[in-house]
Amino acid sequence: MQSASIEAERAAGSPAALDTAAAEFRAALPETAVITDPQRLRTYECDGLASHRVIPAVVVLPETAEQVRDVVRTCAAHGIPFVARGAGTGLSGGALPHSSGVLVVTSRMRSIVEIDVVNERAVVEPGVINLDVTKAAAPQGYYFAPDPSSQQVCSVGGNVAENSGGAHCLKYGFTVNHILGLEVVTPDGELVELGSDAREAPGYDLMGAFIGSEGTLGIVTKITVRLLRKPEVVQTLLAGFPSTDEAGAAVSAIIADGVTPAAIEMMDALAIEAAEQAVQCGYPEGAGAVLVVELDGPAAEVEHTFAEVERHCRARGAFEIRVAADDAERAMIWKGRKSAFAAVGRISPDYIVQDGVIPRTALPEVLGRISRLSSESGVRVANVFHAGDGNLHPLVLFDDAEPGAGERAEAVSGAILDLCIEHGGSITGEHGVGADKVKYMGRMFTDQDLDTMQRVRCAFDPVGICNPGKVFPTPRLCGEVPGRRTGVHPLTEAGLADQF
Ligand SMILES: Cc1cc2nc3c(=O)[nH]c(=O)nc-3n(C[C@H](O)[C@H](O)[C@H](O)COP(=O)(O)OP(=O)(O)OC[C@H]3O[C@@H](n4cnc5c(N)ncnc54)[C@H](O)[C@@H]3O)c2cc1C
């Protein structure tokens, strides 16, 4: 384990080091793969969290794992920070560049290397678009289950880094449940493999540690994903309820009855209004909330459980239930839900996409408190979320042209996360901490928790050049003695762990 001074980590690339590195990149990469022109660099100044912007010093677009390795080696040799970027759709600023660092963009690494249905897996490069994996496997009756709403544009490398979820993760699990192996460039420029072709391997689950680490432990250059056989049938239902209370009660009743739908999504009145304006999805008129419930599996099973779901919805007050008769109707039902984030732009010039988790049973209580927060502050909040997972996505609306409106919206947004923590939940369900939620980490974790997590980061990245400044409020190094807040960690005190 290498130690380094705090100054080295936080100093970032000096102008001279960056010039040298850019020259080395030009020698090793295709001519168009190195960008230093200030105008062109602006293309990469933000991800989906456009309120945070930083222009990188250099952008590189490698085409092979070896090129990524060489770029990282150069960065490591010169002490230059680097940040990986896939499609840049992240909503927490995870791919926000470093102003004195290198942005490594994987958009030229889009090969689907292998579709192996016999072993139910595919091997892809990190820049491959999520939905393209399913498109490639579909002719053989297979698909890639993780389905973030951004799946038409986001990359599998980004999915791995964020451990992304989606509507169907209720039944099938998050990205982590669908990754079998990773090829990774470590922060010191070594190309290594994590995971194995076998389902189980001895030793620490380093791949598990890597998935969801938000680009802080290295750059993924190849991914072996699990493929699932397409279900025999899919049934989709849209139910209109008077309010989110009844819809929330229906969700709890369905799951308590032992039914695990592929997806249960909820939208409240304001989210429905936005979706109607944007895509005219024709949701039940006058609904205070809608549920989209999808079941999939063998025909006989789905037929039986679908009847149960309908019964629970009616018993909890659903006043209208529609069942998709074919794929076109199913697509229309999903269109309203999948367009909801962007649709909110129709009813508000600006909005914050919040992401928090609560236990499913706390839905009615927390939604009621969000509604009170909204009326007390005068800040409108639209709710659209993965109800089955208790993964909320409150959309906090404001008009930045109005003085103080942004700050009020930010305060409401933070108060919603406090509600999630208070109810035993989490400050992020699937969008990650990135740059945006660093400030909330201390609300959820103790200093000792954070310190322990950073020891893992230090083991991968002793000098702190890999996506620095993300996830942790106070970055620490392997050579850094826990600071003013931490004292001696209980594990160290018990002789179970060393202080690096
Ligand atoms: C409209 C919309 C809807 C969305 N819906 C969902 C949703 O339903 N569920 C969900 O989970 N997310 C959702 N997201 C968020 C986002 O799409 C996901 O987090 C996605 O996985 C990011 O992929 P990306 O390729 O855009 O990654 P980027 O934004 O480019 O990067 C995200 C993070 O991954 C790291 N990274 C990227 N590539 C690599 C690599 N090769 N190696 C190591 N680290 C890497 C970056 O450093 C950064 O920290 C949505 C976003 C939008 C805009």
Image (cartoon, rainbow, N blue to C red):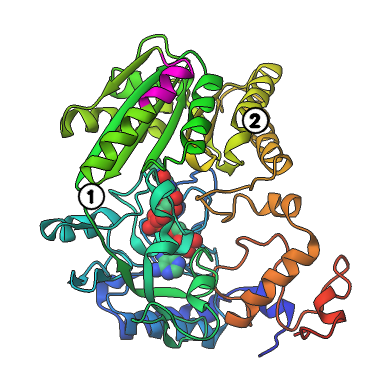
Q: Residues within 10 Å of mark 1 (few under 14, many from 20)?
A: some
Which residue extends farthest bottom?
Answer: 1
User: Mark 1 or 2 closer to N-term?
Assistant: 1
Q: Is residue 211 above or below residue 402?
A: below
Report the front residue among 241 and 392: 241
Relative horizontal placement of residue 211, taking residue 407 as reference (left or right): left
Disc 2 marks a residue whose amino acid type is Val
Q: Residue at x 84, y 74 (%)?
A: 490
Which residue, given by chain and number where applicable, does mark 1 sit on?
Answer: 231
Q: Nearer the viewer, residue 483 or 37?
A: 483
Q: Position of residue 351 (x, y in %)?
A: 52, 31
Residue at (62, 60) in percent of width and height: 471
Badge nearest the viewer, 1 or 2: 1
Query: Is 358 above or below relative to 106?
Result: above
Could you tell me which secondary element the residue under label 2 belongs to?
helix
Quarter holding residue 8: bottom right
Which residues fall within the magenta stretch? Answer: 310-318
Q: Quadrant of residue 27?
A: bottom left
Mark 1 lies on a secondary structure that is loop
Q: Residue 366, which numbered label?
A: 2
Image region (quadrant) for ligand 1: bottom left
Q: Residues within 10 Å of mark 2 (few under 14, many from 20)?
A: many
Asked whether the viewer can see residue 489, the reply is: no
Horizontal placement of 26 versus 401: left or right?
left
Instruction: Single out the residue that lies furthest toward the top.
Output: 286
Left/right of residue 1 with respect to residue 430 in the rendered view: right
Residue at 79%, 62% in the rendered image? 447
Quarter holding the N terminus is: bottom right
Image location (x, y in percent) of residue 286: 41, 9
Q: Position of residue 134 (x, y in %)?
A: 22, 56
Give me the residue at 40% from left, 12% from top: 319
